[in-house]
Image: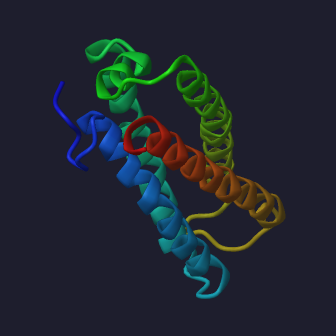
Amino acid sequence: MANGFLGYPSTFMLDVVVCALVLVVPALIYSIYLAKFKRAYLQHRNLQTMLGAVLFITVLLFELDMHVVHGGWEQIVAKGHEHTAEQMATIRQLLRVHLLFAVSTVGVWIFTLYWAWRRFPNPPAPGPHSRLHKVLGWISAIDITLTSITGLIWYYVAFVR
């Protein structure tokens, strides 16, 4: 099995996702900064839409690669290292925690974007939906941050350590 481009026994798409997990949080922080401090609502909307689209495409390609090309995450992890049953149990548990945040992030982010597109004017400006949007935005930001942290921990335990 070919190594990922980060030099560990993963896959190309796993390494792409790891890079995305590292880049998404700073991009998200910048996007929040644009809205909260610069009042650059159009740039905030465009960046959030771009992040959502890029992450959707990345995750879709990742899932296809993971399940169709490689036969699942256990096949990839098993080819990389000799893991004990206890180590595999830890890796499996870390993946469950990661997926809890990853799946909820998708739902919250889609909901947040959908309602923003529907309820904000074009060009975007503060309005009656702003209060709910701020709550949903912070939930999304916290969720994607936890998705990133748990995904990076999983990658480290499964491939680096």
Left or right of 77 on screen, residue 9:
left
Question: Residue reaching furthest left?
Answer: 2
Residue 50 horizontal/vertical position (percent)? 42, 56
Q: Is residue 51 above or below residue 40?
A: above
Left or right of 41 on screen, residue 27:
left
Residue 150 appears anywhere in the view: yes
Q: Residue at x 61, y 73 (%)?
A: 32
Quadrant hosting residue 98: top right
The colour scheme is rainbow
Pick the quarter of the image with the N terminus: top left
Q: Is residue 16 above or below residue 38?
A: above
Total numbered badges shown on the rendered structure: 0
Residue in the foreground of this view, choosing between 142 and 109: 142
Quadrant hosting residue 78: top left
Q: Residue at x 34, y 28 (%)?
A: 81
Q: Residue at x 65, y 51 (%)?
A: 146
Residue in the foreground of this view, choosing between 22 and 137: 22
Residue 119 appears anywhere in the view: no
Pick the quarter of the image with the C terminus: top left
Residue 13 horizontal/vertical position (percent)? 29, 36
Residue in the foreground of this view, choosing between 70 and 118: 70
Residue 113 horizontal/vertical position (percent)? 61, 50
Residue in the foreground of this view, choosing between 143 and 116: 143
Residue 8 horizontal/vertical position (percent)? 28, 42
Q: Is residue 73 above or below residue 50?
A: above
